[in-house]
Amino acid sequence: MKRTRVATIAGDPGREIDLAAALGRRGDVELVLRCLDRVELLAAAGGASLDAVICVGYPRWLDPRCTDALVAHGVARVGVAADPLEAEELRRLRFEPAPSDVSVDRLIALCAATDPGGMPPEGDAQVAGRLVAVWGPKGSPGRTTLAIELAAEVAAAGSSVALIDADLSGGDIAQMLGVADDGPSVIWASQAASKDGVGPAELDAALSPLDEGFALVSGINRADLWRDVSHYGWKRLLDALRSRYQFIFCDLGSGLGTTEPETDLLADREAVARETLTTADTVVAVCRGDAVGVKNFLWAFQSLTELVDPGRIVIALNQTHPRDEAEVAYLIRKYTGKKPTACLRWHSEAFWSARDRGVSVRRTRFRNDIAGPIRDLTSRCGIALAPRGVLARLSGRAS
């Protein structure tokens, strides 16, 4: 009798142990390898003559490169998903998903029946918008103000833009921009997005269009209400916005704790932060340019780089006094290896003027005081804006 040669992937080590034990007791299965990382999986795909791989859970390191290697060697792929979010991620990577209570007999049957070529799921080729997470440590580094100005600048250039208030301690963007408190919030938006078949009309109903030119997903005033935003709903909301808008900016609190979900009520909020940071195209890390701000930033930056490739991070200095710019930039580069991209000087009159009117600084008479750094930052985020200046205005190419 030919034995099916199988490797497992430990996306969820606890569940994978039980499955591996069950597979090892079968006479018709040879458990070749239990893969804990990308290196082991790629080695098994290339040299172990596998018939199938069974992925238990969804490990963050699993990517299209892994799938391509398995497809190239004719390896069938089956996943065991604990929830709809895991199933969606596995399906996106061309694994046939099965529920967590699936029997071992059924898994082996799926391994035999699954097409090793496995085409991508329908709809996978849709154009996705660019997600920019604006992150900062504790201590009010000016993250929210910067997120508003980035969204306003890009929207003014003619792009479709959405701004999400995901401040995990309590969102303030709606109040800063004069939006009614009883408007739609991120809870409503994530619940709408999590429903099957949600369309543009349903999604638009969960957003607040603003005179600034962008749509706002309002935040939550109370931190404990974040438990009403599921990980699955948040993921679907980000995907829905990416399919609807060219650029999505997310004002995101630090949320980089290491506590376990079953023992800490903050875990749901941290899952939102981690999902956003790991899937963002660019992360703007905001550092307040004083002694306390720099200290908080350097401590938190290490945790950030454990989630995000430094190549996707750009650093912005905010609220920096002109006399301190060079020294602060030197310290940031020395301890992070990255040179700050933009430096916004302390300009209290400009920001208070904007808050009093409930608008972005871009819509006040102080717009030119911050326009240069903001446009430099958008460029480093991979966003090309029309040129500005006298010649550009004369030619009609800029607002």
Image (tube, rainbow, N blue to C red):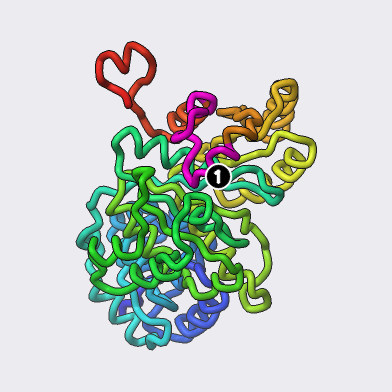
- Of 110 and 377, nearer the camera is 377
- Of 18 and 148, nearer the camera is 148
Picture coordinates of residue 329 (x, y %)? 68, 26
For the C terminus, the quadrant is top left
Secondary structure, mark 1, is helix
Picture coordinates of residue 212 (x, y %)? 38, 43
Splitting the image into 4 quarters, where does residue 381 fall? Answer: top left
Q: Residue at x 49, y 24 (%)?
A: 368
Can residue 267 be seen here? The reply is yes
Please give left or right for residue 275 compared with residue 49 in the image: right
The extreme front residue here reads: 356
Specify start and end residues of the magenta stretch as a single range. Answer: 351-372
Q: Is residue 45 above or below residue 132?
A: below
Q: Residue at x 53, y 65 (%)?
A: 220
Q: Is residue 336 above or below residue 83?
A: above
Type of amino acid at the residue the image marks with label 1 = Arg
Please give left or right for residue 339 compared with residue 38 in the image: right
Q: Which residue position is annotated with label 1?
A: 355
The extreme right residue here reads: 291
Q: How many marks?
A: 1
- Characterize the local packing of mark 1: few (<14), some (14-19) or many (20 or more) Cα atoms within 10 angstroms: some
Q: Is residue 369 magenta?
A: yes
- Of 123 and 389, nearer the camera is 389
The secondary structure making up most of the magenta span is helix
For the N terminus, the quadrant is bottom left
Please give left or right for residue 243 compared with residue 366 in the image: left
Picture coordinates of residue 276 (x, y %)? 49, 55
Splitting the image into 4 quarters, where does residue 216 fall? Answer: bottom left
Q: Is residue 298 magenta?
A: no
